[in-house]
Image (cartoon, coloured by chain):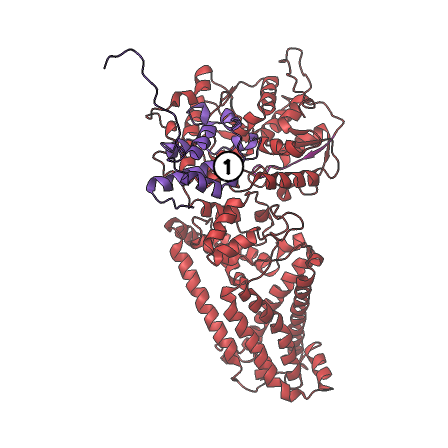
Amino acid sequence: MVNFGFTINKSTRIDYDQASKDVSRYVIAHEPSALLCIGCGCCTATCSAGQFTPFNLRRIQLQVHRGELARLEQETEKCMLCGKCQMVCPRGVNTRHLVMTIHKAMTLYNRGELKDL
Amino acid sequence: MFRERFSYAPFVWPFVIGLIFFLCFFVAAIVRVFKELPQSDKIKFGKSLFTKQTLVSIKEIFMECLLHRRIFQRDPLLGFMHMSIAFGWFMIIVLGHIEVKLYCPNHLNLPYFPIFFRYFVKQTDSTLGGAIFFFLMDFFLLMVLIGIGIAIYKRINSRIVGMRRTTRLKIYDWLALYSLWSIFPLRLLAESFTSSISGGSFLTRGFGLLFDSFVSNSVHVVPTWWAYSTALGVFFIAMPFSRYMHILTEPFLILLRNAGIRTVRHGQGYALTETFACSRCGICLDPCQMVLPGRMDKKATVYFISNLRYNHMETAREMAEMCMQCGRCVAACPVGIDSCRLKLSVKTDNQMGQGDTYLQYLNPASDALPAEIQPVVRQMPEKPDVVYFAGCMSHLTPAIPRAMQTLFKAAGIRYRYLDENGSVCCGRPLMLAGQEEAARQLIAKNTELIVKSGAQTLVTSCPICYRVFTEEYKLPIRVVHHTVFIRDLIAAGKLSTEPVQERVTYHDPCDLGRGSGIYEAPREILKDMAVLQRAYEEKDQALCCGGSLGSNLMPYETRRKIAADAFNRLTFRNPDVLVTACPLCKKTFQDVADRPVLDIAQYVATHLRAQKADAAPVEETPYRAAV
């Protein structure tokens, strides 16, 4: 194929019929305040880990609900649980526990042990 | 002058069976605890025996297990209730044995003999020795009976002993409780009915004469002794399953604790001893701020330990995750159970990452951005006196690091602001969440950064960081919290403040006060500056702000309620300003405050007196505008 110096981006379309909702359901069941999130990104703006790494809680929680689960387990392992995000969250989301719950859900999911809720 | 009537009666059997059952259980439990102790702790315990420490322990056992000094300090009537039952009963047992030793030493090998002495031996109260024994036995019996009277009334109205609530009991506790309540009235009855034969003193003789006037005493002698023995037997059999196991576990716990042994893992060794030493007295119910006023939630530590003990691990785990780890229950506990550590050991079961992938970016070999963690170290090459670590939370309250920099400049101290552009967390939040492995990585990273700075003193603004720096980091340099640092600067004359016409209340942050024992430094600073008003609950009784990182599960609404409640209780004397020493407390209180909430560094920096003409210009930190 001739190299024209550009490529076509991979489709970012999300097929909700195909995407796995298991992790999302697990997270909401174990940390219901996840539903309060409005995606404002205050957590990400203030994040300690975000200064050194691409860790982004706003994106992670979005990906959980969209079922884009690749590499999410490793992503959550960047969090130091320092709690700044929780202090600034305008919606009162229990962010520290949210990260821990997502991590746990992803561990179970990757092992194939996540039970259908 | 005395005559042995019998040396055996069939009614001793309920008591003997109960006693043997209980002793077997107790010995097995002690053997199990010793087996489960780590090797280093066994050596520690061995070394602590027969030293000065043993005398200290014996004194503590006497003061706490028998006299209940800590409960006395809390409420005299409650202390008297516990003391009269424990000490009175103890004295009855001791005196009973002395009597046997004096009058029939050949029967000391019969465990039941001192208990039913009055039935077996016809002594006389007409000799001086006899009269003294009769009097003492009656006196201590009366003491126990009064204690039991208070205990029964406490179940109806616990407020008379200064408790808003009392513990809800389990079935075995009720069985043991009712048998305990009946033991001593039955003993009184039995001894009264026997008093015409064996003699008695003011209590037993008096009741004996009273009963004589309308019942035929001789018929009632054996049945009442049977009842007394049965009550004892039931109590002993229920004891290992009930809260009364604490009676013998507590002295053992004191010996272990004074040897320097601490909880390693729940359900094993020392932790197991702690769960059995909990008397479920309910003194931790009122201090617990999670139990909001007017609610009867089973949230306090007493229920957590009870769940651990009866192996309801799921509930126990949930409670450990919910607890704010403020330590008010630990400060109040008359047994001295370190329940915070117990809860942490439960939380540690759920480790997120096992070290290899977790926080990978801290490892310089990884492809993350390790160099970015050390921007300040590169920027400031000169050797500082002090390295300042503001902490994550202080970055949410920038007024605090700003005030600290003002103070450093005013005092002429060469400092390095280690996390000016952000740094990794201190590791305590991870520890509180039970992620100890991950926390160790942060600790290693921070130690490296701090040592590399070359300073001799580490100052931090955050009590959370301070506690982990002092407890877990093995730093070769001095670590101070800024309250102590500012106090020392003022004492050395490097800083001076101007008097302020304001009423100030100081709030003790959990990790600084109960956690690290710093109570006086901030008060010394504030006393010299303004009118320091005491909070109703202060020092080791201080309230938690509700923002604690100790709780994983607590929802925002509950935190807010706790914060509002704590703020109201703190400001009941209506101070102009609430001063604290923790960025987390400050930020949490600001949400619910109707008056300025300031950090002590801010307060000092705002009211700094310019000393010399050439002193560095003091940066203004107007706080009123910010509120």
All told, the count of numbered labels is: 1
Residue at the left extreme of this rendering: A1
Seen in the picture, residue B562 relative to B106 is either above or below; the reply is above
Residue B589: x and y in percent read 64, 34
Tint of chain B: red
Chain bearing tag 1 is A
> In the visual, does B412 lie left or right of B203?
left
> In the visual, does B546 lie left or right of A3?
right
Q: Magenta residues: mostly which secondary structure?
A: loop
Indicate yes or no whether the magenta region holds residue A13.
Answer: no
Q: Amino acid at mark 1?
A: Ala
Q: Which residue is mark 1?
A: A34
Residue B275: x and y in percent read 50, 56
**Quadrant including the C terminus of chain B:** top right
User: Of residues B406 and B170, which is closer to you in this image?
Assistant: B170
Report the residue at 73% width, 29% height from top: B530
Tint of chain A: purple
Whether residue B562 is visible to the viewer of this picture, yes or no, is yes
Quadrant of the rendered structure where residue B335 is? Answer: bottom right
Residue B473: x and y in percent read 45, 34
Please state the extent of the stretch shown in magenta in the rendering.
B503-512
> In the visual, does B604 lie left or right of B19?
right
Seen in the picture, residue B420 relative to B146 is either above or below; the reply is above
User: Of residues B53 and B268, which is closer to you in this image?
Assistant: B268
Seen in the picture, residue B227 relative to B519 is either above or below; the reply is below
User: Of residues B312 and B521, which is closer to you in this image?
Assistant: B312
